[in-house]
Amino acid sequence: MKIEKSLSKMEIKHLSWLAKIELTKKEEDLFSNQLNDILSYFQKIDEANVEDLPPTYHVIDISNVLRSDKSRPPNPEQALKNVPKLKGRYVKAPRIV
């Protein structure tokens, strides 16, 4: 499965430089082949006829999976439960000069 345009060794070196990874010559050859195979799969996907298909924004039809918000009175004891240092009912923070 060959593609019309393949990534050159210079482009692979540039991509590795952008990713800040060092590649050996063997790895450059390996990644060149792998990336070109991936690009050929994309080319195959581009050939699919999708003219009559409506656009899909989500694979599954879920509009909202979040719980609804419920208003309730504040609970200061619960809010201060995990504070490392308290002074009375206030949070004690380190001095910043």
Image (spheres, grey):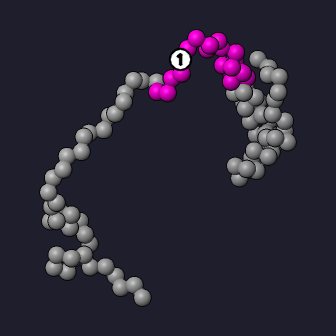
- The segment highlighted magenta reads 40-58
- Place residue 96 in its image quadrant: bottom left
Can the viewer see residue 91 in this picture? yes
- Number of numbered discs visible in the structure rendering: 1
Quadrant of the rendering where the C terminus is positioned: bottom left
58 sits left or right of 48 in the view: left
| Percent x, y of residue 95 | 35, 85
Q: Residue at x 79, y 46 (%)?
A: 14
69 sits left or right of 36 in the view: left
Q: Residue at x 84, y 38 (%)?
A: 9
Q: Give the secondary structure at mark 1.
A: loop
| Percent x, y of residue 39 | 72, 27
Q: Amino acid at mark 1?
A: Pro
Residue situated furthest bottom in the rendering = 97
Q: Specify whether residue 55 is painted magenta.
A: yes
Q: Which residue is mark 1?
A: 54
Can the viewer see residue 30 in this picture? no
Quadrant of the rendering where the N terminus is positioned: top right
User: Residue 84 versus residue 49: which sits nearer the camera?
Assistant: 49
